[in-house]
């Protein structure tokens, strides 16, 4: 049962089933990004940060996963398998989607008994290996059927100097949908919650060996 439909964002009292999600994804593949700063979360684009802070809420979490090449290898595999979405209140459709620029996914979220289905397209993939560090990750950005507007980058990094491995999440967003505007504080809370709990999911993932 659809509760609300505005700008093609869907809210429902029931969790969308697979056919509904597949139809959603098929439609979103033809849709553009909903913001002009596509790719601005890339580390090489950090000079955009002051401008982003003027127009968006910027979120950055950097948390340690452990140390060593084995931890990095497991963390890289976890990112590739979308393990940061191994949470009980948000679902990624679908975890088998390859991490390739242009691929579309749907993020299902549940809050206060209401489900939302939100479209994201992978913007870029980051895979670096140099003398100082190794990094692997990607960013995805919002398509029209999403409750917010913006981009989120998730990566893992191995610092060779001290052998530490980190999970790094960087995002910028602003409210889009009417319900998101009404619940701005709650939306920010959910974003902070995902940053914290996705770190815990990554810790669990690197421990599974």
Image (spheres, helix red, strand yellow):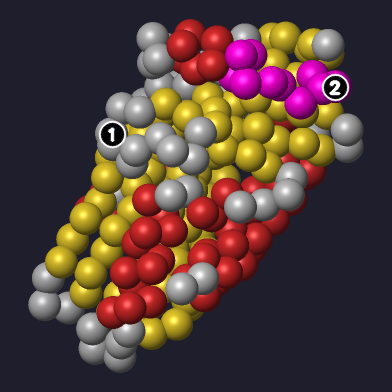
Q: Is residue 128 above or below residue 203?
A: above
Is residue 182 shown left or right of residue 175?
right
Classify mark 2: helix, strand or loop: loop
Q: Which residues are magenta?
A: 12-21
Residue 124 on image: x %, y %: 28, 40
Residue 94 on image: x %, y %: 51, 33
Is residue 127 shown left or right of residue 137?
left
Q: Residues within 10 Å of mark 2 (few under 14, many from 20)?
A: some
Residue 39 seen in render = no
Is residue 33 shown left or right of residue 187?
left
Residue bearing the label numbered 2: 13
Query: In front here: 103 or 123?
Result: 103
Which quadrant of the rendered structure holds the N terminus?
top right
Residue 156 is drawn in which quadrant?
A: bottom left
Q: Residue at x 63, y 63 (%)?
A: 196
Q: Residue at x 55, y 10 (%)?
A: 23
Q: Is residue 198 above or below residue 22?
A: below
Membership of 17 in magenta stretch: yes
Q: Residue at x 29, y 58 (%)?
A: 136
Which circle marks residue 153 in the picture?
none
Which circle marks residue 101 in the picture?
1
Q: Is residue 151 above or below residue 69?
A: above
């Amino acid at each position: 049962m659809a509760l609300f439909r505005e700008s093609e964002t869907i809210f429902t009292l029931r969790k969308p089933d697979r056919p509904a999600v597949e139809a959603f994804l098929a439609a979103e593949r033809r849709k553009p990004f909903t913001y002009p700063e596509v790719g601005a979360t890339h580390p090489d684009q950090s000079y955009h940060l002051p401008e982003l802070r003027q127009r968006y809420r910027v979120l950055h979490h950097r948390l340690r996963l452990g140390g060593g090449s084995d931890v990095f290898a497991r963390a890289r595999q976890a990112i590739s398998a979308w393990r940061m979405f191994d949470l009980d209140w948000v679902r990624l459709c679908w975890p088998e989607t390859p991490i390739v620029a242009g691929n579309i996914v749907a993020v299902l979220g549940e809050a206060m008994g209401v489900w939302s289905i939100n479209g994201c397209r992978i913007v870029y993939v980051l895979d670096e290996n140099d003398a100082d560090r190794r990094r692997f990750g990607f960013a995805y950005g919002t398509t029209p059927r999403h409750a917010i507007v913006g981009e989120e980058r998730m990566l893992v990094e191995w610092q060779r100097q001290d052998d530490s491995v980190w999970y790094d999440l960087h995002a910028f967003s602003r409210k889009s949908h009417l319900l998101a505007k009404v619940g701005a504080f709650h939306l920010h809370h959910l974003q902070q919650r995902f940053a914290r709990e996705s770190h815990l999911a990554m810790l669990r993932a690197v421990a599974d060996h």
